[in-house]
Image (tube, rainbow, N blue to C red):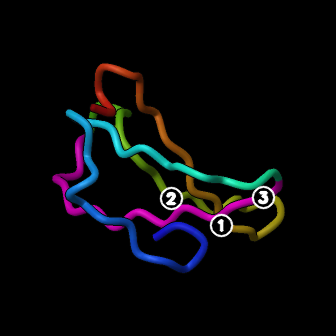
Amino acid sequence: MLDGRPLDPASFDGNRLPLQNLAAGEHELRVDAAMRYPRTSEGMHRFTDPADGETYVYTQLFMNDVQ
């Protein structure tokens, strides 16, 4: 979903999804994905920081892994 609107999966160009007609400013892109959880430090990770109690999500993906 981009800014609350679903994206058309048929618009995939190879392994890329073009985001067209974006106005200047902030946007929200939500991605739902199902994949196996690797133990190699690659992928998406969730972490709760004991120092501030906040939960963070970060990725350790490189361009060849993302595609």
Residue 6 vs 62, above or below: the answer is below
Label 2 Cα neighbours within 10 Å, binned few <14 / some 14-19 / many ≥20: few
Q: Could you say where residue 62 lies in the image, as x and y percent from the top left?
A: 41, 23
Please name the amino acid that badge 2 sits on: Arg
Residue 22 - label: none
Question: What's the residue at 50%, 59% (across, down)?
Answer: 46
Question: What's the residue at 41%, 31% (across, down)?
Answer: 61
Indicate which disc, 2 or 1, sits on the residue closer to the N terminus.
2
Which range is magenta? 25-38
Separation of disc 2 and disc 1 at Cα?
7 Å
**Foreground mark, 3 or 2?**
3
Label 3 Cα neighbours within 10 Å, binned few <14 / some 14-19 / many ≥20: few
Q: Splitting the image into 4 quarters, where does residue 57 fall?
A: bottom right
Q: Splitting the image into 4 quarters, where does residue 23 fall?
A: bottom right
Q: Could you say where residue 50 lies in the image, as x and y percent from the top left?
A: 72, 62
Residue position marked by numbered label 2 in the rendering: 46
